[in-house]
Image (cartoon, rainbow, N blue to C red):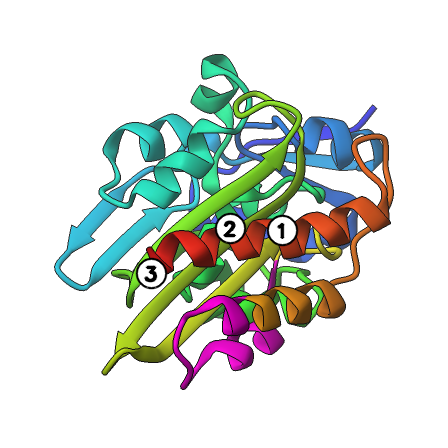
Amino acid sequence: MAEYLQPESLEEAAGMIAAHGSSLAIVAGGTSAMRFVVPYAEHVMGVRGLDMTAIERSSGGLSLGSGVTMSQIRESLPIPALQEAARGIGGPALQNMATVGGNIFAHQPYGDVAVVLLALDATVTFSSVNGEQTQKLAEFYEAGGEPEGLLTRIDCAAPGGELVYLKCGRRRFNSPTVVSVAACVGFDNGHVGNACIALGGASKHPMRCAAAEQALVGKALDEASIGAAADAAAAACSPGTDSVATEWYRRRMVATYLGRALTQIAG
């Protein structure tokens, strides 16, 4: 049976992580970790008592403690796409437990809130025995998604354009994700000035899709550019096959749902 650890401070938690390394499972809400991580761990560290549940709002964006729950996001945040993503994760009981930090590390195809955070170009901050380290969430995933310390905070700017989130599932709510898509598009003189495209269920981790973004920037958001971006996303992703959906179907749905999201933005 795994040893249970309960740190009383961030410094103590960082020390436990340094001491036990990959044999340690970190649990906040436990909705994902209890299934995919804890059964294989020698040590389990509970961090729910570390009070990382603050939400700070400013004119420039948001700062979320890693312990903020899906219920808090659903009820308190002024960004509809984040609320929609949180609302689609399980039922009310699960949303009261599941945290944004856990969602960032969730086994794919889960991690719907993380997909929206990627489209917002969010940064993540980790606390370790060497101090704090902040990096782009996209860069964290690209580097393999292995933390060096305890995730404490997620920061994101206000959307740099119109932000749309769509999820493909068997049902709208309380349903496993097939794929999820978040698109944030800003315009300059009638053309796409900036674009952030993020995909869930399309790779080992949620991913930013640079190829789809490049297909849009500098062009009018019309049928041709939307089709090119959707095709680029389908080609760039590397989904898996599981009990929810096949690789072939996920790739098709990446193109379909990104096309729908961009068409919604185009109006």
Residue 159 falls left or right of residue 28: left
Position in image of residue 43 (x %, y %): 74, 36
Q: Are marks 3 and 1 in contact (CB under 8 Å)?
A: no
Name the quadrant of the C terminus: bottom left
Q: Earlier in the sequence, mark 3 or mark 1?
A: 3
Position in image of residue 134 (x %, y %): 44, 70
Residue type marked 2: Arg
Q: Which residue is mark 1?
A: 256
Give how far apart the Cα atoms at labels 3 and 1 are: 27 Å
Disc 1 secondary structure class: helix
Q: Of circles 3 and 1, which is in front?
A: 1
Q: Which residues are magenta?
A: 207-226
Instruction: Looking at this view, name the residue that lies furthest to the left.
Output: 59
Name the quadrant of the N terminus: top right
Q: Which residue is mark 3?
A: 156
Q: Which residue is mark 2?
A: 260
Residue 72 falls left or right of residue 144: left
- Badge 2: few (under 14), some or many (20 or more) residues near its Cα, within 10 Å? some
In this orientation, does residue 151 appear? Answer: no
